[in-house]
Image: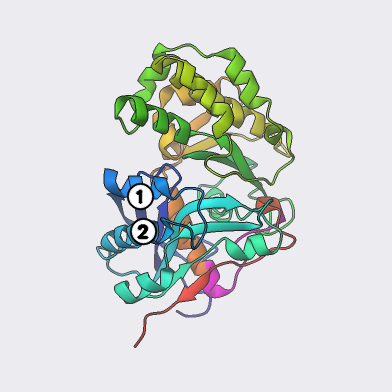
Amino acid sequence: MAAGGAIWALGTMSGTSLDGVDAAMLLTDGEEILGFGDAGYRPYSEAEREVLAAALGCWPGDPGVAEAAEVVETAHAELMSGFDGAELCGFHGQTLAHDPSGRGATHQAGDGGVLAEVLGRPVVWDFRSSDVALGGQGAPLAPFFHFALARLIGAAGPIAFLNLGGVGNLTWIDPAARGPEAPGALLAFDTGPANAPIDDLVRRRRGLARDEGGRLAAAGSVDEAIFADVLGHGYFLKVPPKSLDRNDFHARLAAVDALGDEDAAATLTAIAAGAVAMGAEHFPAPVSRVLVGGGGRHNPVMMAMIASQLDCPVEPVEAAGLDGDMLEAQAFAHLAVRVLRGLATSAPGTTGVRAAVGGGKVSRPGP
């Protein structure tokens, strides 16, 4: 790659919802987005998901972690091998545990070196560890990509991206800043639980992958006591940057176990929306719109609840010509090129790290 030149990179993401692996091609020089390419999805089987779920909360060396890593590597290799033309790959891995404030560590299962050998291409991976080592939260990492997207779509003033995955996260962006690492360019943080508790509920009770179309939530009523208890957690008042593990609210959310299916889904959906609204109170300045990616944008009940609490349009990212299913995979393609070029991938405003830092390891295939 010529210095500063754009390349086609393949990025992947396996999120906290444990549904499967997304992969997407992106043409980028690590600063500007110059083209979008093919994308694909490889679902985890129920057996694979059970292996991953059993390893949640585990750290390297714990029982079940090696088996989880094998599932992650196999699924990614199967999907990624179907893409042609990628000069570089970005591999996020599967987050099993995340405790930057307590343990000072984060754990994503899967070895990029293994994938480099299988694919015969350089793979950038372990994106979060350097940030955590320098006092950052290690998450969220998509904001530098969001900054490039805001420039791409011609945002004239502050704008926000919201990802509604297993955990929700917000990125506030000032596209007039000189770059994503500049002071005041970005503020990013996890909002709170989003799809994960709802998915877990309907899978456990009804054998379904999700509350399709928000139908259960639409038929239920919100338990105001549980809603108030969860959103009374000190996390929501904590000044960002801040991040969460998938199960950080598990004990409080367990209160919905006493509710019927519809009321439980409605309550969990309202909690996800309320967490976003409380997060927006931290924005440095009002935004013109909130663009939503991730599976939650397909839940009209959740989207309506969020929109009712914000003073601006709340729209799927497709309204701006983007692909909400592949945004995070594209982000790790973009970040992989930044790592290769020695550019920063996080900054104080995105993860709370002490200074802008470039994360990630580069593994290259053997001769």
Compare residues 27 and 25 and report the one nearer the observer: 25
Please give the residue where the numbered disc 2 appears in the rendered image: 67
Query: x, y (%) of residue 180?
Result: 64, 57
The residue at 54%/70% (across/down) is 339
Q: Amino acid at mark 1?
A: Val
Q: Is residue 124 left or right of residue 280?
A: left
Please give the residue where the numbered disc 1 appears in the rendered image: 51
Q: Residue furthest front?
A: 63
As displayed, is residue 248 above or below residue 139? above
As displayed, is residue 101 above or below residue 28? above
Is any atom of residue 45 visible in this view? no
Query: x, y (%) of residue 261?
Result: 39, 17
Q: Is residue 236 left or right of residue 207?
A: right
Q: What kind of element bears circle 2?
A: helix
Compare residues 349 and 67 and report the one nearer the observer: 67
- Residue 277: image quadrant is top right
Query: x, y (%) of residue 137?
Result: 65, 53
- Residue 77: image quadrant is bottom left
Q: Quadrant of the C terminus?
A: bottom left
Is mark 1 in CB contact (under 8 Å) with mark 2? yes
Is any atom of residue 122 visible in this view? yes
The residue at 64%/46% (across/down) is 188
- Please give the range of residues in magenta: 338-348
Mark number displayed over residue 310: none
Q: Quadrant of the N terminus?
A: bottom left
Q: Amino acid at mark 2?
A: Glu
Residue 105 is a magenta residue: no
Q: CA distance from mark 1 to mark 2?
A: 7 Å
- Mark 1 or 2 closer to N-term? 1
As displayed, is residue 303 above or below residue 187? above
